[in-house]
Amino acid sequence: MRILSAFVLLTLVPAQASNAQNETILRIRTSDVIHFVVTDPKGRVTGCDPRGNQAEEIVNGIPNSNYSFDTVGDLAPVTDSTVTEDVSLLFEFGPIADRDSGIYHLTAIGRIPGVYTISTLFELRKPRGYYSTDSTVKGVIDANQSVSYTFRLGDVTRSAFPAKSVNVNALQQDLMNCFKLRLLGESELHRDLTRRLDKLDKYLSDKDSSKARHELEKFQEKIDQVRKETVKTEQKKAKPPKHFISKDAYDILTEDVTLLLKQLPIDKKGKGGKQSNRLQQKS
């Protein structure tokens, strides 16, 4: 049977909380492609890790949390690519205390290969007002792979949304998954982009940040060019070009490049700043 929905409920209320104080709610909803686990600042875990776990066992390690599925019958098998399960993580807690704030880790784990989304809704409910903001991030994953995110609780006026943890290996993994899912092609393009990332990895290993930045910018220029040509054929409803990249693949890879560029210093001549600013404006 199909999974209808799932959620985690975490309630954290300081010792002397009152109904007159603020209430903060963080909701995280994901697509059916993944399950996920959340780890709090003390290392306690709530969620479901499907890797090597046929029963998809649920763990509720964070105090006052509950990860459960609203299902009819059994869980759909992880090999069923048509599964339409709706998986949600729901945090609810009262006024934030120091012990509740800090960095949380969210690990997305692939059930089946595909493009996934993580949507977050952050709400601050005051006695005389209401504030909310939302965000959605997108990624690509293979079965049993994982992708790491972090988010911080403590200041509801700033983004508490998951931030992707990216290194060159994560970018290489995303490129491979995009190719496997036929979100970019053909093989020649994939080989070209892979070679660029191999060079990037070498430069980073040699701690040559200038060459690493240059190679990363060339990688972005290449997918910019391919995406531009892909859009032209899409608008004309023509046959896809030999080298193509879908919007999903382009957005995911561009996000990775942007995050990696932020980790690389701009050289003494200021090179790399223009490209970094351009990508940050796009993200």
Image (cartoon, grey):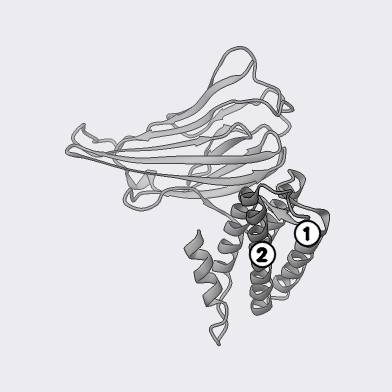
Residue position for label 2: 225
Count the numbered circles shown. 2
Residue 212 sits in quarter: bottom right
Residue 209 % position (x, y): 64, 76
Judging by the rendered image, the residue that carries numbered circle 1 is 189
Question: Horizontal placement of 109 versus 123: left or right?
Answer: right
Classify 171 as above or below 51: below
Which quadrant is home to the N terminus? top right
From where the camera sits, is residue 67 visible?
A: no
Instruction: Find numbered disc 1 in the image and state the secondary structure of the residue it sits on.
Output: helix
Look at label 1 and name its amino acid.
Leu
What crowding class fits label 1: few (fewer than 14 Cα within 10 Å), some (14-19), or many (20 or more)? some
At 72% from the left and 47% from the top, the residue drawn is: 177
Front one among 130 and 15: 130
Q: Residue 248 carries which label?
A: none
Residue at (70%, 47%) from the top-left corner?
183
Name which of mark 2 and mark 1 comes first in the sequence. 1
Task: Give the amino acid type for the residue marked by disc 2 in the picture.
Answer: Gln
Q: Can residue 282 be seen in this view?
A: yes
